[in-house]
Image (tube, helix red, strand yellow):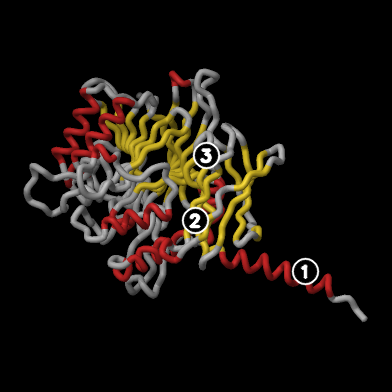
Amino acid sequence: MRNYFPVLLLLLLCTSVSAQKSLLHSGPMLGYCEQREVLIWVQTNAAATVQVAYTDDDGVKQMTNSVTTKKAEAFTAKLIADEVQPGQHYTYDVFINDQRVKLDYPTEFTSQKIWRWRQDPPTFTVALGSCTYINEPVYDRPGAGYGSEYEIFRSIDQKNPDLMIALGDNIYLREPDWYTRTGYQHRYSHTRSLPEMQALLARTHHYATWDDHDYGPNNSDRTWVHKELAKETFDLFWGNLTSGLPASKVATGSAGITSTFRYNDTDFFLLDNRTFRTPNDQDRADNKTVLGKPQLEWLIESLIFSDSPWKMVCIGGQVLNTSKRGETYVNLAPEEQKYLLRRINEEKISGVVFLTGDRHHTELSELELPNGNMIYDVTISSLTAGTGSSRDEQNDYRVDGTLAVEHNFGILTFSGPLKQRKLEVSVFDTEGKKIWDRSLHH
């Protein structure tokens, strides 16, 4: 009589592994990266227990906390690797219901290094992008899909950036999504599960801010009835270090999604241009705002405090563009824009770079302040949404040769000694071919 037990055991094992992989909806995605902690995000298709094992190069294995995913939270889990050592490289594995999920791309991270008082800060790179539209015909407008060239995410992954910052319109809420938790969670889940995106999610640390299409309807503002639902869903799907203004800055109402983090020697400020904003069409000009006074003052004070050679301010809409077209700062709240630039000048804050999205084209804007310091606006748009609508736009501060109207992404490279830190901006097309690059100067 034949012994079928080994065959049966193999079949059961294969079935178990396949079942666990089928429970993985999207991710893993790396969130914030610190010297002693790294966040790993995972989404399942149904309630399941999720855990991550991470192993250093000497073979020492640690386990994260275990999380049971819930429907109310879109079956998302945030796992904290809290036994990492500074500057160490780790590989990691996702376990669903105690079974390892086999993935066909690298899953690895390196915690931030201790460098201060020891050496110059490390060289590192940051990928940038905005406006990710993933077609779903049953809910889209009739006609050709607005999204295309999803392979751009594989091109970004091939650049192997240390971080990626999503600069807004990271999803596009559709009309059926706007008014319910079900709708918000569906749109985030649909976008995040894009196959072309998964390898990039798994080995690059992701941070994000938002714009109108992650928040609510087109051009939505502080009157939006579901601003708290928008924040709740954003926080479920992204792994920023914090979310919202400090309590001391917000007397009542929403704290928004404002955040900040430091990577090596560089401070990044993730602003919220929706929660506190007045309606675009409001005629009264003396109190129009994009950021709101509490967030604006927090930003200025944070820039004053920062000792970072470069201070990277991330916001969904353009700051320096002189065109009064679309949602440019000068078109929406010119007095607030003047105040922000005046305060940066008065406080002699150097190295300020705005990282922006929204406009479905890419460009570099630069402005010399009265005190002689340079200020920049690096706009990167779009990743997969429609492009080219601003081809003929006049922006007096645009650097010649930096307008790009095809799908694209950006890479920032920080390098050099602490006191002479260099910043290079490079822009690439869908296939990863360079469109332009520029070196920024204080």
Q: Quick one: label 3 or label 1, which is nearer the N terminus? A: 1
Give the residue pinned by disc 3: 37
Q: Which mark is residue 10?
A: 1
**Viewer-nearest residue: 38 or 166:** 38
- Amino acid at circle 1: Leu
Residue count near mark 1 (Cα–Cα under 10 Å), binned few <14, some 14–19, many ≥20? few
- Secondary structure type for disc 2: strand
Q: Quick one: label 2 or label 3, which is nearer the N terminus? A: 3
Name the residue at 35% across, 70% down: 140
**Viewer-nearest residue: 281 or 390:** 281
Give the residue pinned by disc 2: 77
Name the residue at 47% across, 34% down: 413
Rendered location of residue 336, percent (x, y): 17, 38
Rendered location of residue 180, percent (x, y): 31, 67
- Amino acid at circle 2: Ala
Rendered location of residue 12, percent (x, y): 73, 71
Query: Can residue 226 be seen at all in this image of the molecule?
Result: yes
- Secondary structure type for disc 3: loop
Distance between the Cα atoms at labels 2 and 3? 16 Å
